[in-house]
Amino acid sequence: NAVLKKTIFNLTFYPLFVIVTIGMSAFFFFPVVIARPFIGVRRTLWVTRQLIRWYGLVVTRFLMFPFVRIIYKDFEKGKEPGVCVYVCNHRSSSDGFLMAYLGVECVQVASNWPFKIPVIGWIARVAGYLNVQKMSSEDFETTACQLLKENVSIVAFPEGSRTTDSKVRQFNGSVFRLAQKAGIPIVPLCISGNQKMPEKDSWVLTPGTIYLHKLPTIHYEEFKDLIPFKLKNMVREIIQNEVDKLEI
C-alpha cells in the first residue's frame, strides 16, 4: 500500500534524522570546533567538510533506506576533474545531501534559508559555506577564488530556488564568471526523481528513485572565449537534456 509505505517512511525518517543530526553535532562537529586552536583553521575546515560528507551519506544511504533508491552515475569514472565548479539543477531541499556522493572537499553556494535551519545552519557556517544573499558579488568572487586556491571545489545551484517541474530555470551567471576568472573546469550535475522528497512547501517525503548524474567535464579551454551569458546557457542546456532523458 503506497499510503502506508509513505507514512512509515516519514514516521521513521524524521526521528532518526533529528537523532543523527544532533548526535553528529554533539560528538563530532562540536568537538572539532573546540579543537580548532590545536589543529589549525585549515585542518578544522577540512575535517568539518569530511564530516558533512559522511553525514550526507548516512542520511541518503541509511536513513532513507529502503524507501529511496539512489542511482549515482559518473560519466567519467576514474577521470577526476580536480578542483572545479560543480553546477547542479535544483529539484528539492534534499539536493545538498546528495553532494556527498561526489567524494571531494567542497563548499556549497546557498541562499539564506539553509543557514536558518537549527544545527544544520550552524554546521554550514562552520564549514565555510557561502551565503550569496549576504555577500556582494565582489566578496563572493574573492572568497570563492581563495577556496579554489586551497583545492576546495565549489558546488552551485544557479537556478537560485528549486523547480516544481522538469524545466531547468535560467541560471545566475556568478559561478560561470568565477570559473572563467579562475581558469578551472565546470562539471554539470543532473538531479532527477527527488522533487517529492519533499515537495516544495511541504515536509512530506515520498518513496522513489533519485538519479544523480555527474556529466562530462567542460574544460576551461572549451569556454574561455565565451561570454558568461552563452556559457551559462550552454551548461543549462546540457543539464536540461539529461533531465529530459531521465523524465521521459
Image (cartoon, rainbow, N blue to C red):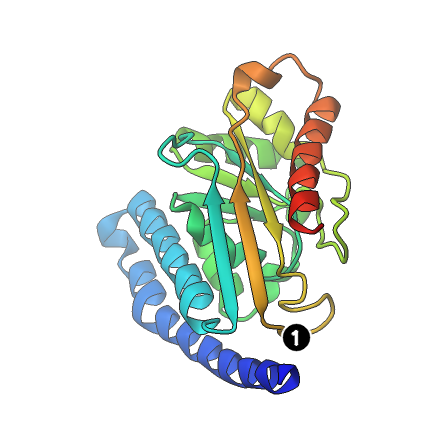
**Kind of residue indicated by mark 1:** Trp
Q: List the residue tagged with mark 1.
A: 203
Horizontally, residue 71 falls left or right of residue 141, namely left
Q: In the picture, which quadrant includes the N terminus?
A: bottom right
- The residue closer to the viewer here, 247 or 50, is 247
Taking the spot 44% from the left edge, 60% from the top edge, the residue there is: 56
Horizontally, residue 119 falls left or right of residue 113, namely left
How crowded is the residue under tag 1: few (<14 C-alpha within 10 Å), some, or many (20+)? few
Q: Position of residue 223 (x, y in %)?
A: 61, 18
Q: Position of residue 164 (x, y in %)?
A: 76, 58
Q: Is residue 230 above or below residue 64?
A: above
Taking the spot 77% from the left edge, 55% from the top edge, the residue there is: 165
- The residue closer to the viewer here, 218 or 153, is 218
- The residue closer to the viewer here, 56 or 137, is 56
Q: Position of residue 54 (x, y in %)?
A: 36, 59
Q: Position of residue 158 (x, y in %)?
A: 67, 42
Q: Is residue 120 above or below residue 141?
A: below
Q: Is residue 77 above or below residue 94?
A: above
Q: Is residue 194 above or below residue 25?
A: above
- The residue closer to the viewer here, 138 or 216, is 216
